[in-house]
Amino acid sequence: DQQVKQNSPSLSVQEGRISILNCDYTNSMFDYFLWYKKYPAEGPTFLISISSIKDKNEDGRFTVFLNKSAKHLSLHIVPSQPGDSAVYFCAAISSGSARQLTFGSGTQLTVLP
Amino acid sequence: DVKVTQSSRYLVKRTGEKVFLECVQDMDHENMFWYRQDPGLGLRLIYFSYDVKMKEKGDIPEGYSVSREKKERFSLILESASTNQTSMYLCASSLSVAGELFFGEGSRLTVL
């Protein structure tokens, strides 16, 4: 039973265009969401997060949007760069939970030069 | 900078062997985690610990155990390795409950 779903295993985008990575969740108790980025042979690194009291958070080229009614969040990267090519994991947590993040299955983003 | 160090980047073991994966963090974080990453399944939590000598089961604890004798060190133990435990193992730590996880570089284990 996957509580956090990333339905697109891969995405290819041209350099300079927008990349949109999607994530859906089923647990209405989740109130904090994070995106992690992972290069091959490295551990994931934190990218950006959003609390459920917001619907948007922006950090440079990266923006995360949260639609609580649809239980959907998305990560926008504008403009996309070849160095953004990586696996992106969506993660969620409930502040009332036993302190563990639930991760999605990841989306491989490839930015083509 | 936070540093999470995993003792072995690559290991090859035989079925039935006992395997130790060590993880050390240098930022005095309370919480430490062990995940495994498999294609199409993302990161799945095996065990976590929020204090010395405390441990909690994650989503897939079967076949694994952990040890946290010191705050900075969290070990994952495979008592009798099996081929379905071939995977990438990732250790992480965090300061607060909903805080950012800091990951190590991972240990790729192959069980023959």
Image (tube, coloured by chain):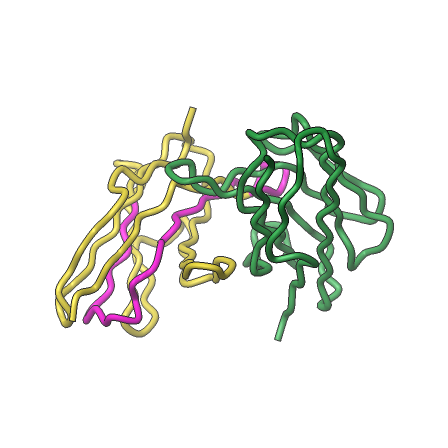
Chain colours: A yellow, B green
Relative to residue A2, is residue B86 depicted above or below?
below
Relative to residue B93, is residue A62 depicted above or below?
below
Question: Which percent across, then down, holds residue B85?
Answer: 58, 34
Question: Which percent across, then down, holds residue B47?
Answer: 67, 38
Relative to residue B51, is residue B100 depicted above or below?
below
Along the horizontal axis of the image, is B103 left or right of B48? Answer: left
Along the viewing direction, whichever of B70 and B39 lies nearer the viewer: B39
Along the horizontal axis of the image, is A68 left or right of B81? Answer: left
Along the horizontal axis of the image, is B102 left or right of A112? Answer: right
At 66% from the left and 35% from the top, the residue drawn is B14
Can see residue B102? no
The quadrant where residue B66 appears: top right
Along the viewing direction, whichever of B108 and A108 lies nearer the viewer: B108
The quadrant where residue B96 appears: bottom right
Relative to residue B12, is residue B41 depicted above or below?
above
- The stretch in magenta equals A73-100
At 85% from the left and 43% from the top, the residue drawn is B53
Task: Determine if the magenta segment contains residue B33.
Answer: no
Along the horizontal axis of the image, is A62 left or right of B54? Answer: left
Question: Which percent across, then down, holds residue B100?
Answer: 54, 58
At 65% from the left and 47% from the top, the residue drawn is B33
Quadrant that contains the C terminus of chain B: top right
The quadrant where residue A25 appears: top left
Can see residue B16? yes
